[in-house]
Image (cartoon, rainbow, N blue to C red):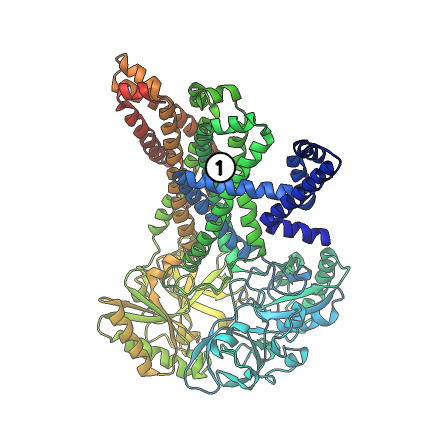
Amino acid sequence: MNQLLRRIRMLLHRGRFNAELEEEMRLHIELREQKNVDAGLAADAAHREAHRSFGNATVLRENSHNTWGWGWLEGFAQDVTYGVRSMLRSPGLTAVALLSLALGIGANTAIFSFLNAVLLRSLPVRNSSQLVVLGEGGQLGQTSRYGSTDLYSYPFYRQFQQKQQVFSEVATLFSYNPDVHGTIDRRDQMQPIAADLVSGTFFSTLGVEPAIGRLFTDADDNSEGDHPVVVISHNWWQTVFSGDPDILKHTVKIGDTTFDIVGVAPPGFFGIFVGHTPDLWAPMSMMNAMPLHFTGYKDNFSQSNLILARLKPGVSREQAEANTNVLYQQIIRGFSDAKLDAYNLRHLEAAHVKLTSLKTGLSALRHRFSDPLKILMGVTALVLLIACANIANLLLARSTTRAREFAVRQALGAQRLRLIRQLLTESLLLALTGGLLGIVVAVVADRFLLRMISGGPNADLIRLDVSLDLRLLLFTLAATISTAVLFGILPALRASRIEVTEALKDGRVSSNAATRSPLGKTLVVTQVAISLVLTVAAVVFLRSLVNLTKVDTGFNRQGVLRLDIDPTVTGHKGEDPRLIAMFQQIEQKVAAVPGVQSASFASFFFAQGTWSENINVPGAPYNDHIFVKHNIIGNDFFRTMQIPLLAGRTFGTEDTAASHKVAIISESVARDLFPAGVNPIGRHYFVRKDPNPEEDVEVIGVVKDVKFSGLDEPQQYIDYIPNPQHPSIYDGLGVRYTGDFNAVSTAVQQAIHSINRTLPISRITTLDAVVDRTITNQRLVAELSAFFGLLAVFLSAIGIYGLMSYIVSRRTNEIGIRMALGAARSSVRWMVMREIVRLVVLGIGIGTVISLAAGRLVATMLYGLKPTEPNNLAIAIAVLLVVALTAGYLPARRASKVSPMEALRYE
């Protein structure tokens, strides 16, 4: 420890150490000199003998430094200091290099931060690697289908919890939790609340400890409706309650129920869904008290829950999966109300419960954005590679101008390894500075990307944590060091391999060797090839996006105002006649607003989820793999959406709760699910397989096919049901209007509140904006690919311009001689351009082969075109040729304007 402290003191106080060392050496020499004088030697002889016997002072100084200090660290500090001065002597090169690195490293860091948040980051819970979810966790909602291995009923969870032997704890949560509205501490003002329903074992299974108060226990979930308690998130506590330490005295009222706050979750905890951050959690026992008044607490086949569990120590996932599948069959078949007919048994026999790791949580974002983010990660990596090639080329040119410096240092005894270390230190210094700037770029870019992924500037931001963490910083550090090696090693090796005598003669290496070195040209070819690949990708994704925006949706997306209301605050349930009457009154009131042509509620407008079942058409084969999407609508829905009626009629006042059930079907249902050649108008079908008279529906109309969930989806089977015959709690209203959006929006909200002033109104937008948000991932890839493609071309242009300018400067004497001997300016331009044309054509050839080979990697992400279409390649080649040849022409033009006399005098 003493030696370490001594070395540190020597490093920090080097000047004082040197002074003390010189003083000590001087005293030693004076003592020797005095001793010699005392022995009878003359003063001059005593002085000489004292110095001779003391030894070489320089060697002693070096030995002392090596003993008391860190020679390697001092050498590194000297290299850094010299590197900083060297960078400042070339401000143009330094600026270009830092800008290239900041953009390259920043883009990679930004994209990786989203990959980290969506795909890689572990849940902030105890030992997340031990957690599993039954099934794949990809299905959300509710199903009555036998053989479901993703969604389970609450009674199934209870039996599974009691009978299983392979998990230390088991929990369940409601798979879909729509936002509700409530009040804080009995205030009048409603506010949106993201509430999740979970079992009493949810927090203990995840291994979470409260920040304040307590979390749920199994006792909070043992009897229906008796536990009006909630646990709130740490973020909600801070934002809504301002971090009040007396938070346990506050209450939250949702619907007709007042919930006591019993605890606060720890900071950073959001549950198991990445991108979804609940404001509070309520026990499953209170599901009926929460809007939408779910009734599945005791229903054996109300399958709407996800089940998660923690593996016991020493139990493998395969062992747990085997035990789970045995119990699955026993529990389902053992329910007293199980319908074990041949149809359901066939589905049960085919069912196999897969256990999926819950280490990184579940996320809809993962399904939507994992492929786009991986593509963009590859794109940004290629951009960084171009930047490295660019900087390497600039450093190669600069190293030639430093040939005399390196020759002098080698002549004075510097080893080649020492020169390489110096140049790599300069490269590392450049890369680290670029990396720090890249982090700043990444922080800014993350906000921009989060806004893009969320659906645009007017959309609610997705609650996704893309902040810097240790993994992200390590990635940035690794990228920085890798870039330093990539762009620094070749120039360092080349610069240190020089002929000392030749370099000392004229101060530079042979101009002929400098201009004909294949390394710089190879780097240019590499840049051009990669730039072509990125340009082709940009063209392909942009054309695919354009194709998507031109898709026929089947409805008129223009001129429709969309908003959501929350009717659950009225306390009425879906089948309540007062709720149906309120919906109709709102439709009529809004339709009377000036500028409004029609208005209608609907369960689904576009990309809002789905409710689908099989239908059984008498006289037609039954296919249980075809599901029809049901949409409960108001009478003016087709007029509002402008969906053409192809046959029959639309809904009217005659279609009431007391009349026979009717439906309007899409043309695909009429064509594919009804007997061929038979007019479906007046025909009947049954929802689900059994011909139950209560499920008998008469077809009264056929409408055009429409896009339901996305622009790139295949044809959809849809039927439309009038709300009075299937009462449902609407939350979406569509309004076709003309005129100013803001004015109409204000008038529509006033009309709604004139019917019921307590109704919360949210997500006010247009149908066109809703449709645009469904192609957010395609737009993200297309726009960022275009940006990075242009950036790659720009960097390549800088590289070409830099190389050609360098070549021209090295051949100035040659050009002067040619022009003095009568060479035309055009021939000089072509002499210079001929070199760059060869390099660009070679790069385009290599890039073309790579582009065609890589096209299949993105084929599934394209719509309406193939990645290998000749037009894509032609457009990319044209863009690259124009930019590359322009970058090469400028130095060639400058070379042709050189005065022969000045060129001949140039050195």
Label 1 belongs to which residue?
Answer: 854
Q: Is the residue 412 above or below the residue 444 in the image?
A: above
Name which quarter of the figure residue 342 lies in: bottom right
The amino acid sitting under disc 1 is Ala
Residue that sits furthest to the top in the current view: 821
Image spot of residue 767 (x, y percent) = 34, 63
Where the N terminus falls, by quadrant?
A: bottom right
Image spot of residue 633 (x, y percent) = 38, 70
Image spot of residue 217 (x, y percent) = 66, 78
Q: Nearer the viewer, residue 361 or 642?
A: 361
Name which quarter of the figure residue 165 lies in: bottom right
Q: Nearer the viewer, residue 161 or 840?
A: 840
Where the C terminus falls, by quadrant?
A: top left
Residue that sits furthest to the right in the current view: 314
Q: Is the residue 94 above or below the residue 686 in the image?
A: above
Q: Is residue 499 visible?
A: no
Q: Residue at x 51, y 31 (%)?
A: 491
Is residue 640 shown left or right of residue 129? left
